[in-house]
Image (cartoon, grey):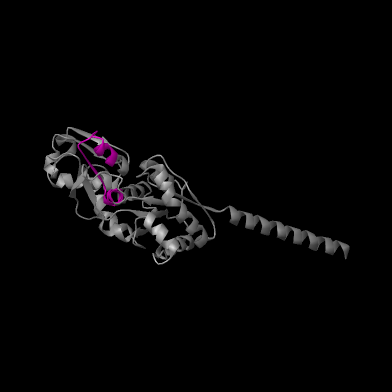
Amino acid sequence: MFSLTRQQALKTLLACALAATGALAQAQQVLRVTAIPDESPTELARKAAPLVKYLEGKLAMKVEFTPVTDYAAAVETLVSKKIDLAWFGGFTFVQAHARSGGKVIPLVQREEDEKFRSVFITAEPGINALADLKGKDVSFGSQSSTSGHLMPRSFLLAAGINPDKDFKRVAFSGAHDATIAAVASGKVQAGALNISVWDKFVADKKVDTTKVRAFYTTPPYYDYNWTVHADMPAALREKLTQAFLALNRDTPEGKEILDLQRATRFVPTKVDNYKGIEAAAKNAGLL
């Protein structure tokens, strides 16, 4: 009888230990999130904080935002599965899709990303059209930026202007806000950037529009999305997708997150939406 009781006790202890181990593993499970550094690190962290908190509640797991140094690092960390969820521009998504052999999946995009645009800005009175950029110093954002480089370059090429031949100097600021600063300070005569960052700077009066102005807005194209690795369990992918789709401006939490993400709402997206960007990248010799 004693032996049986002791055996039962050992089984009970083992079961408790396994349960505790399972609970600990569940508690330690972390969803690692990053974003292309298209704005300053402080701005990216400010935008991420309420979203991280929201996702933790929806997923019942810890969520951590991990900044990266550049666009290439954002691509590599997702491809190598060091990160689980990444905020990509259209071009960085195309790069990750190619780099991974099709092993990344775009989940959602902002409604605004279905018809995204870039703007060209200047502080020079004599610049009023793309042709006026010939012989000038012009800044893009990051070389891997969709709205800050690839698509502006694509529309320039379509207009018969080759930045590498027709501009006096091509500069890369690294981020959209840095492009505005470069134009405002006179380091360059013009720059191209994400329209939503420009509109936000104007609305917040962070730029003197009596001096710096937008003189050309591109046609629309698909842009940003939230992307995961294809190896992420389907159930978690679905939970993530539904969490983004559930964000609603009618709730205080939803409004705060959507405002910071500069979004009306999130909508489902798919790989085919970015075929145009892939074609533009190949045409520009960037892919």
**Residue 285 % position (x, y):** 23, 42
Tell which residue pokes out farthest to the bottom in this image.
250
Question: What residue sits 75% from the left and 62% below the top?
Answer: 12
The stretch in magenta equals 179-202
Quarter of the picture containing the C terminus is top left
Q: Is residue 247 above or below residue 282?
A: below
Q: How many marks?
A: 0
**Residue 162 % position (x, y):** 16, 39
Q: Is residue 76 above or below residue 186?
A: below
**Residue 59 % position (x, y):** 51, 60
Question: What residue sits 71% from the left and 59% below the top?
Answer: 16
Residue 173 in view: yes
Q: Is residue 115 above or below residue 130?
A: below
Residue 78 in view: no
| 193 and 71: which is toward the camera | 193
Q: Is residue 90 magenta?
A: no
**Residue 108 % position (x, y):** 37, 59
Question: What residue sits 36% from the left and 46% below the top?
Answer: 99
Q: Is residue 172 above or below residue 214?
A: above
Q: Is residue 197 magenta?
A: yes
| 28 and 9: which is toward the camera | 28
| 206 and 107: which is toward the camera | 206
| 254 and 282: which is toward the camera | 254
Quarter of the picture containing the N terminus is bottom right
